[in-house]
Amino acid sequence: MKENISAFVDGQQDNNQAIDKLKQDPKLAECFGRYHLIGDAMRNELPQELNFDIAAKVAQAIDKEPVVLAPNAKHTAQQAVNVENAQSTKSKVVSFFRPAMQYGIAASFAAALVIGFQVEQNSQQDVQVPQPVLQTFPVGGALDPVSMQHVEAYPSVSTSDAMLQRQRINAYIMDHAQQLKTRQYSQIEDKENVQTKGAQPD
Amino acid sequence: MNDLLLGHLSKWTRWLIFFSVIVVSPRIYAETQDAAQWLQRMKNSISQLNYEISFVVVAGNKADPWRWFHGVVDGDEVEILTALNGPGQQLIRKNDVVTYLQPEQSPYSIRDTISDGPLPELLRADLKKIAEAYEFHLVGKSRVAGLPARLIRIIAKDNNRFDYWLWLHEETGLMLKSAIVSRDGEALEQIQVSNVQVTDTPSSLLTEVNEAELPEAFTIKNSAPIRSVDWQISWVPSGFEPVKVDRHYLYGSDRELVDYVMLSDGVVWFSIYLRKLKSHESFTPVSLSSGANTYLTQQVQQAEVTVIGKIPFETAERLIDSIRWK
């Protein structure tokens, strides 16, 4: 049916049956809209602003997500087994689509942005921590938290600490993006800092 | 009689080996040489020609369209990359200064850096560096974006990194398509060009940008390297070296102190974080993937180790397994 729609959008098919089905099935109608949008994008006819309304969708998804109050014992128990199994299953890393997790990350990602990025120096730390010179943001198309998918060998985060952990995942991803933006051509001069024992040829 | 036959056979085998050496190996050599020449040609073209390219980045279930302007304006190399979807991010590069522009964020410029954008770093990487870890193969001709193209496969010499496939325009050497491919042959991330225009003079947009006043460029110094870390990585994929080592507060946090190491082989850059856990603290190991990116967090003794970057999951896992305390 999708092929029919595609053909219809491209003007290759003038089929009443397709139009009838489009009218009846909201999913197909959405598909029709999307194909048109793709067509517009390819022809460079996109309007100035596109109303994807992602925020509303994320909010909706969060509303639908069940609130986990107790740590999921099943998951925790499985985890140990899974980690053990990881050795054998790791060769087939399958991208495993988990919308709930993705939206969850998106939401906490937004929350982190609202809280702000004031980085303060803790005077009680006796280590020298540099003040970040600037705060960067990931460029679209690069790695962003919303796009991450679960790898099967590991369970999804479903304990009561999930929220905190998601925030941390975001923080790591954002930090990685920042590090990529502030990397340099030159290698560090003082390599004694970290002792990587050279490369072992495989 | 039997002996004679065997003798003949082995003679034939010897001839066969002789011929393979004479005929085949120069061919492989020539193929590699040709591939290297094509890569050099691509590098020259992308930095010297005036062009406008539209492309789509496909990673996982996402597709992001971009427009890429490049030109040489009064001897300066100017490049603009614009995201066509979403709020409209831009990346402007003028020689060695990269400026990032995003809506509702103040723009900033960084000097002497490698741009972090939609294009693979491989395109501008040093050929010698690439040759250390990858083999080049000129595979064949095909048609991409309506243009005749040459496919060059850049195959990793070990299993610790991904392969790259590049389709280059026969006439100009510009990239028409690229793919980051796993060892299983799965395309994890692809860039598909839909339109290429090469012009004699740079686009007026580039001339404008060249004259525009951009934010003053930051020069990033390696921030406060750690003098004494009590941990070490005993295995890193061959060719990778630390390019950045420091201790900093995790992005957006003023409490989470992390030891940080960035490793690179000149083609791929990835991050390793080590965060000391408090005595009662524990967490669930997490593994995520997005296109070619791997995100892996595991507990190593009383620390949380996180690896992020465009490396295979197995490499990240092996690296974490190799972390030791002094």
Image: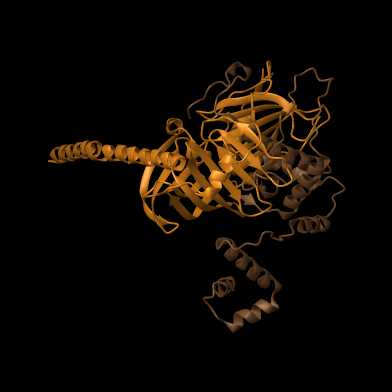
Residue A10, picture quadrant = bottom right
Coordinates of residue B18 in the picture (x, y in percent): 21, 36
Residue at image coords 60%, 49%: B82
Residue at image coords 65%, 69%: A33
Residue B132 vs residue A32: left or right?
left
Residue B324, picture quadrant = top right
Circle count:
0
Q: Quadrant of the C terminus of chain B?
A: top right
Residue B144, picture quadrant = bottom left
Kindly tell me whether residue B184 is visible in this rendering.
no
Coordinates of residue B96 in the picture (x, y in percent): 55, 33
Foreground of the two, B34 or B235 = B34
Coordinates of residue A77 in the picture (x, y in percent): 76, 43
Foreground of the two, A52 or B52 = B52
The chain letter corresponding to brown is A
Question: What color is chain B drawn in?
Answer: orange
Kindly tell me whether residue B283 is visible in this rendering.
yes
Foreground of the two, A45 or B5 = A45
Q: Quadrant of the N terminus of chain B?
A: top left
Residue A53 vs residue A45: left or right?
right
- Residue that extends furthest to the bottom in the rendered view of this protein: A16
Up the image or down, B167 lies above or below B127; here it is below
Up the image or down, A119 lies above or below A39; here it is above
Visual colour scheme: by chain
